[in-house]
Image (cartoon, rainbow, N blue to C red):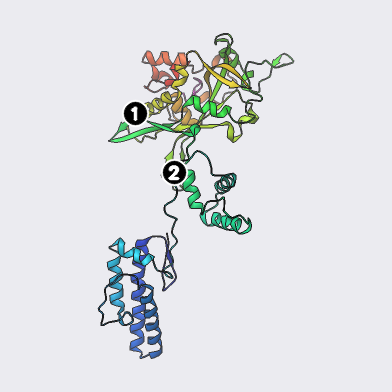
Amino acid sequence: MSFKCPLCMRIFSQRFAYTQHAQKCLKNVEVEVEDDDDNNDSEKYSSEMDTRSNLSSEYENDKVEVDDDNNVQNMSFDSIGSAISEMSLEDSNFENILDSSEEPEIFEEPKNLNTKTCTEFPNDAYKDLMLLVTKYKINNKGGNEIIRFFNKHSNLTESPLPKNIEQGRAFMNNMKFSNLEFSKVLITKHKDKDYFLYYQNLIQCIKNILTVPDITQNFALSYENYEYNRESIYSEQNTGKWWKTTQESLPTGSKLLSIILYSDATTTDTLGKSQLHPIYISLGNIPIWRRNKQDAKQLLGYLPILEAANKDLVRDTFHKSLRHLLEPIILLKDGIDLFINNENTWFYPRVSTIIADWPEATSFCLIYKSSNSSLTCHSCLIKRDNLANINLSVNDVILRTHDEMRKYFENDTQKSVCIESVPNFFWDLP
């Protein structure tokens, strides 16, 4: 909603700003009139009186009570200014200003939009329009011009499009899909504030990915060994040693379902004051070239962002959220049947990869975040001073495995390997 000043033609987006400006603008006009009186300029004074007369007609619907003996044209600028000042205190009087047919110009968003919950668009044209507006970030004014152009040249008795883009956006906001239903759960409470995890069911996210057309055409179901001149060649996940080892640990006849997680906190405004912490899921069974496409991923949830001096509480909140998200992997002791290439296949889901930058990786692995730590790598126990040493042998590289890190934690010697004093949820994953 916008307000246009009838005197200087300035446009204001807020009602309060317009009211304050109107008072100042009227005072400026009054000063000009007084100057003209001092100079005995009758023509200019007459012009100002005409302006004052026009202004009174603009506000003829203001419901301001005036004595019958005095008409609006003889109304002083002081009385008009005080009237507007009084109107700024009551919304009902302001609404009368907005009803003016000419000025100030009001650009209102449509009211009484259809907020009925739907699961699909009314028609394909409606759907294509809203996808176009969303994809290319077209503003409401541009979208409305597209609607007018379509309605003008389509020669249809009834338009398949929304009356305006605002109505279309409201319709989309109220759409609900079974594969995009988010739930929330309370993770922790700190300083009288509740911190929630917003999430989708892990298994449902996997099924959503598998419903994408052509996603399962080259779906890896077993380990493949590639060699050239007696040297192993690694390309996809199912050509690696991890896949082979994990597959051998599964029951006979079952397949490995490789889960890839990606998490990174991000700002949602230009000032960097608002943050969200999304976490995504994809499948390592999908070839790399196909997995890199946008539709091969699913938003798993939004992790709560806790700002607290107690860093152990922050870490504990993070891993509690991960436990809630990935708990289905622990509960599926007998695996899960998924429909792949027109047949049911028995899978065991396992987390294979977590894609993260260094700060995120330290949160997942619960190692010290300080760059001055003696063991800054989240994957191995190489000293910080030796990280660039290319002469290290394989025996010099000691990996941070779940079993080894748990031993240090249970023996209360976690400081020697630079891990935090918080249980790591991933130690419980199969």
Q: Earlier in the sequence, mark 2 or mark 1?
A: 2
Tell me what residue is drawn at x 72 percent, y 13 percent: 230
Specify start and end residues of the magenta stretch as a single range.
375-384
- Horizontal side of 216 relative to 426 (left or right) equals right
Q: Please name the residue that numbered disc 2 is placed on.
A: 116
- What amino acid is labelled 2 in the image? Lys
The picture quadrant where one finds residue 283 is: top right
Q: Nearer the viewer, residue 66 or 154?
A: 154
- What amino acid is labelled 1 in the image? Leu
- Whole-percent x, y for residue 426 in the image: 45, 20
Tell me what residue is drawn at x 42 percent, y 54 percent: 111
Which image quadrant: the N terminus? bottom left
- Horizontal side of 282 relative to 86 (left or right) equals right
Magenta stretch holds residue 377: yes
Tell me what residue is drawn at x 68 percent, y 19 percent: 233
Q: Nearer the viewer, residue 353 or 76?
A: 76
- Horizontal side of 225 relative to 107 (left or right) equals right
Is disc 1 surrounded by few (<14), some (14 to 19) or many (20+) residues within 10 Å?
A: some
Discs 2, 1 touching: Cβ within 8 Å: no
253 lies above or below 172: above
Disc number lying in front (2 or 1): 2
Marker count (numbered)? 2
User: Looking at the rendered structure, which numbered label has been put on residue 313?
Assistant: 1
The residue most toward the front is 157
Kind of element beneath mark 2: loop
40 lies above or below 30: below
- Whole-percent x, y for residue 113 in the image: 44, 50
User: Looking at the rendered structure, which numbered label has been put on residue 12?
Assistant: none
- Whole-percent x, y for residue 311 in the image: 35, 30
**Can residue 248 be seen here?**
yes
